Image (spheres, rainbow, N blue to C red):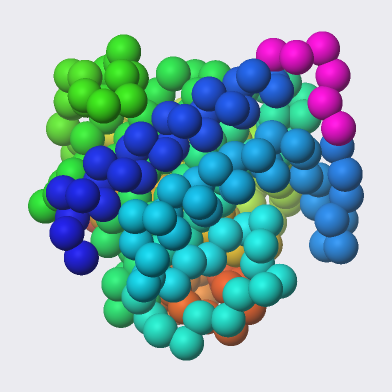
C-alpha cells in the first residue's frame, strides 16, 4: 500500500462526502428509513456511501472494501481491508445536532493503521498522515491541497481529575457506573467517532463504550487515536480491540490516553 496515495484519496473522498451530506442536512427535509437492526438510515448515508465506495474501488481495485450501508453483502477473508462508515452519528444528523462524521480507514492484519474522521457540520478534520501520525487539519479544506496541519497527541492525564467523554445518544447507567470508578473533573457528551478524536487531541482522557458498535463505527477513530499515542482495548480483559471479526461486531471497549490508570470492568 502506498500510504501517501491512500491518505490523499481518503482525505479527498471524506471532504466530497461531507459536501454531499451537508447539502442534504441543510435542506428543508430529507427521508429517513429504518434498517433491519432498527437503526435509522438517510439519503445522506446512502449518497455518501455511493460516493466513497466508487472512489475507493477506482483507486484501490484489489483491496477488499467493507462499508456500513453494504455490509450485508460483505465477506472479508483477509485481515487487511478498507472499511467505511459514510455517516456515523445518523441520530445526530436526523436531530440536526451536528455531531456526525465521515469515516474511512485501512485495517492491516486486524489493526486500524490509517484513517480519516471528518465532521463537516463542526468543520473539524482528523487523520493519520503517511507515516501513521495523527494530525488535525485547520481548514480551509481544499480538496487538492491540505491546509495547516496540527500534530495530535493524547494528554498526560491527571488520574485525580480525569476528563471523560461518553456517547450523547447511547449513554446508560452501566456507562455511568463505570465512569464513577474514576476521579472525574469533567464529563462531556459527544456523538459519533468524534469521541475518539477528543481523546486523540487531549481534550478528553477516557472514552468507555458499553454498548453495541460495529467495526465501521470505530476503525477510523481508532486509527486516529492510535496515531496520537492512544489505545483502544476490550472492556472485559483490556486486550487490544481487533478487526476482521465475524459479522464485524465489536465487544464493549475503552479508548484512552495511556497515562490513565484503567479500572477493571
> Where residue 92 sits: x, y (%)?
69, 31
Q: Is residue 174 left or right of residue 233?
A: right
Residue drawn at point x = 77 percent, y = 29 percent? 94
Q: Nearer the viewer, residue 52 or 236?
A: 52
Q: Nearer the viewer, residue 242 or 234?
A: 242
In magenta, the rendered stretch is: 26-31
Q: Nearer the viewer, residue 16 or 81?
A: 16
Q: Nearer the viewer, residue 224 or 78?
A: 78
Residue drawn at point x = 54 percent, y = 43 percent? 51
> Where residue 60 sits: x, y (%)?
34, 62
* Above/below status of 173 relative to 98: below
Q: Is residue 21 left or right of residue 226?
A: right
> Where residue 2 sits: x, y (%)?
17, 59
| Residue 114 in view of the camera | yes
* Above/below status of 120 relative to 66: above
Q: For the image shown, how many numbered marks are present on the structure?
A: 0
| Magenta stretch: helix, strand or loop mostly | loop
The residue lying furthest to the bottom in this view is: 77
> Where residue 249 sits: x, y (%)?
61, 72
Residue drawn at point x = 43 percent, y = 37 percent? 14
Q: Quadrant of the N terminus?
A: bottom left
| Residue 182 in view of the camera | no
Q: Is residue 66 magenta?
A: no
Residue drawn at point x = 44 percent, y = 18 percent? 123
Q: Is residue 113 left or right of residue 15?
A: left
Amino acid at each position: 500500500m502506498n500510504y501517501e496515495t491512500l491518505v490523499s484519496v481518503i482525505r479527498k473522498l471524506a471532504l466530497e462526502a461531507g459536501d454531499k451530506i451537508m447539502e442534504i442536512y441543510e435542506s428543508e427535509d430529507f427521508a429517513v428509513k429504518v434498517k433491519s437492526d432498527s437503526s435509522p438510515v438517510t439519503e445522506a448515508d446512502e449518497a455518501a456511501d455511493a460516493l466513497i465506495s466508487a472512489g475507493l474501488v477506482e483507486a484501490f481495485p484489489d483491496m477488499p472494501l467493507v462499508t456500513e450501508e453494504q455490509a450485508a453483502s460483505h465477506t472479508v477473508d483477509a485481515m487487511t481491508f478498507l472499511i467505511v462508515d459514510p455517516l456515523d452519528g445518523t441520530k445526530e444528523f436526523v436531530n440536526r445536532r451536528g455531531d456526525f462524521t465521515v469515516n474511512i480507514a485501512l485495517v492491516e492484519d486486524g489493526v486500524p493503521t490509517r484513517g480519516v474522521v471528518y465532521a463537516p457540520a463542526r468543520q473539524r478534520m482528523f487523520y493519520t498522515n503517511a507515516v501513521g501520525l495523527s494530525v488535525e487539519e485547520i481548514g480551509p479544506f481544499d480538496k487538492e491541497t491540505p491546509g495547516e496541519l496540527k500534530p495530535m497527541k493524547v494528554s498526560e492525564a491527571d488520574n485525580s481529575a480525569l476528563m471523560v467523554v461518553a456517547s450523547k445518544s447511547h449513554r446508560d447507567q452501566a456507562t455511568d457506573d463505570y465512569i464513577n470508578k474514576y476521579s472525574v473533573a469533567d464529563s462531556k457528551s459527544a456523538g459519533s467517532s468524534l469521541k475518539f478524536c477528543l481523546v486523540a487531541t487531549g481534550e478528553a482522557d477516557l472514552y468507555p463504550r458499553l454498548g453495541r458498535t460495529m467495526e465501521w463505527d470505530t476503525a477510523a477513530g481508532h486509527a486516529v487515536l492510535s496515531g496520537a499515542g492512544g489505545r483502544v482495548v476490550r472492556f472485559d480483559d483490556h486486550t487490544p480491540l481487533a478487526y476482521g471479526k465475524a459479522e464485524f461486531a465489536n465487544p464493549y471497549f475503552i479508548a484512552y490516553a495511556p497515562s490513565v490508570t484503567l479500572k477493571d470492568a
